[in-house]
Image: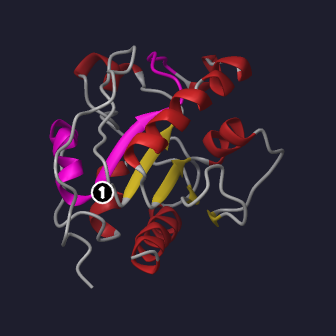
Amino acid sequence: MDLFAGQPASAPSLPPAEGPLPDIVAPGLECLFVGFNPGLRSGALGHHYAGRGNQFWRLLAAARLTPRLYRPEEDATLPAIGLGSTNLVARATASAAELSRAELRGGVPRLARIVAHVRPRVLAYTGKGVYLAATGLPDAPWGVQERPLFDGVADVVVPSPSGLARLSFEEKLRWFREVRAEILRRR
C-alpha cells in the first residue's frame, strides 16, 4: 500500500502556536509527530527538527515515511503527504531539561485541541520523555502504546531523533518503521 496516496485536503488551520515555530497540521493527517519543544537552531530558523545533528528527516526518509529526504525548510509541505509536527511547549530552549514538568503538562490541553481538530491516525512522540510528560506515566516502552492518550488515535513512542540521543541510527530507525507500520495497520 502506498503511504502517500489519498492525502487530506487543505482546511482552515488552528490558531498559530505561541512560539517561533508554526504547528504543521491539517485535518486527516496519517501521523502527527509531537516533540518536547523547538531547539534554539530550529527556533532561530523557524523550521522543525533543524538542529545540525538532528536525524529526524533522515529517519523519515529511511523509514519510508517520506518519498525522499526532505530538508527542514520543507516542513510546511508535510501535510501534503499526511504528516505533521507540533510540540508540547512552543518556546525554544537549548535543552528540554530547561522545561518544567508543569510547563510540559501545560501543553497537553493544546495538544488535545490539535488532535480534536486534525484527527490524526497516529501520534508519534519523538522521545520517551515527551510521551511520559504528556501522559504523566512513570515509564513506557518504545513503540505502540496499549492505552493511547486520546481515543481513536494510536500512540507510538519513538527515540529522540537528536544526534545527542545515545541510540544508534539503526535502532532509532527500527521504531520509526513501527510508525509507518501502525499507519498502514490503521488504514
Question: Which picture quadrant has residue 187?
Answer: bottom left
Q: Which residues are magenta?
A: 72-94
Residue 28, given in percent of the width and then of the height, sits at 32, 55
Q: In this orientation, which residue lies closer to the viewer: 7 or 160?
A: 7
- Above or below, 97 against 9 in this view is above
Residue 45, given in percent of the width and then of the height, sits at 23, 22
Q: Secondary structure at mark 1?
A: helix
- Does residue 104 appear in the picture of this structure? yes
Q: Residue at x 61, y 40 (%)?
A: 130
Q: Residues within 10 Å of mark 1 (few under 14, many from 20)?
A: some
- Above or below, 115 against 90 in this view is below
Question: Which picture quadrant has residue 177?
Answer: bottom left
Residue 82 is one of the magenta-drawn residues: yes
Residue 85 is one of the magenta-drawn residues: yes
Q: Residue at x 32, y 60 (%)?
A: 60
* Residue marked by disc 1: 58
Q: Residue at x 50, y 53 (%)?
A: 123
Residue 39, given in percent of the width and then of the height, sits at 42, 25
Residue 72, given in percent of the width and then of the height, sits at 22, 39
- Does residue 162 appear in the picture of this structure? no
Q: In this orientation, which residue lies closer to the viewer: 74 or 6?
A: 6
